[in-house]
Image (tube, rainbow, N blue to C red):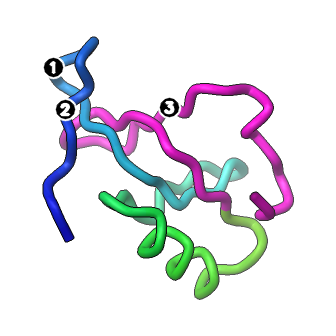
């Protein structure tokens, strides 16, 4: 696994793939590549979603970019 890319707009954030649940919020993992995020989602179940976005370093603050990416059933 490689290094995370920095978010060019926000120096305190990195780019990557997150596996998370919306309700209640749980950022289960944050990865450089999609394969690791999807593997974790397979373990955790359909309540979890995988999306590419930006994460604040040292926190569970994650934001993805497109609203149409916000499916709630764990399917991408």
Q: Which residue lies most toward the right here?
A: 73
Magenta-span inclusion, residue 75: yes
Residue that label 3 marks? 63
Which residue is more in the foreground, 57 or 39? 39
Q: Residues within 10 Å of mark 3 (few under 14, many from 20)?
A: some
Which quadrant holds the C terminus?
A: bottom right
Image depth: mark 1 or mark 2 in front: 2
Q: Where, by quadrant of the figure, is residue 57 drawn?
A: top left
* Residue at mark 2 to residue at mark 3: CA–CA distance: 14 Å
> Gap in Å between the C-alphas at discs 3 and 1?
15 Å
Residue 5 x, y percent position in the rendering: 21, 40
Image x and y of residue 15, in percent: 32, 39
SS at mark 3 in the image = strand
Question: Mark 2 — residue?
Answer: 6
Which label's residue is closer to the chain start, 1 or 2?
A: 2
Q: Disc 1, disc 2: CB below 8 Å?
A: yes
Figure check: 8 above or below 52 = above
* Mark toward the start of the polypeptide (2 vs 3): 2
Residue 59 highlighted magenta (yes or no): yes
The secondary structure type at the circle numbered 1 is loop
The magenta stretch spans which residues?
49-76
């Amino acid at each position: 696994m490689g290094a995370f890319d920095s978010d060019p707009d926000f120096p305190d954030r990195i780019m990557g793939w997150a596996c998370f649940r919306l309700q209640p919020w749980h950022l289960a993992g944050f990865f450089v590549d999609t394969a690791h995020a999807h593997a974790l989602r397979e373990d955790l179940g359909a309540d979890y979603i995988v999306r590419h976005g930006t994460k604040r370093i040292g926190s569970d603050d994650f934001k993805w970019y497109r609203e149409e990416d916000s499916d709630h059933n764990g399917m991408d």
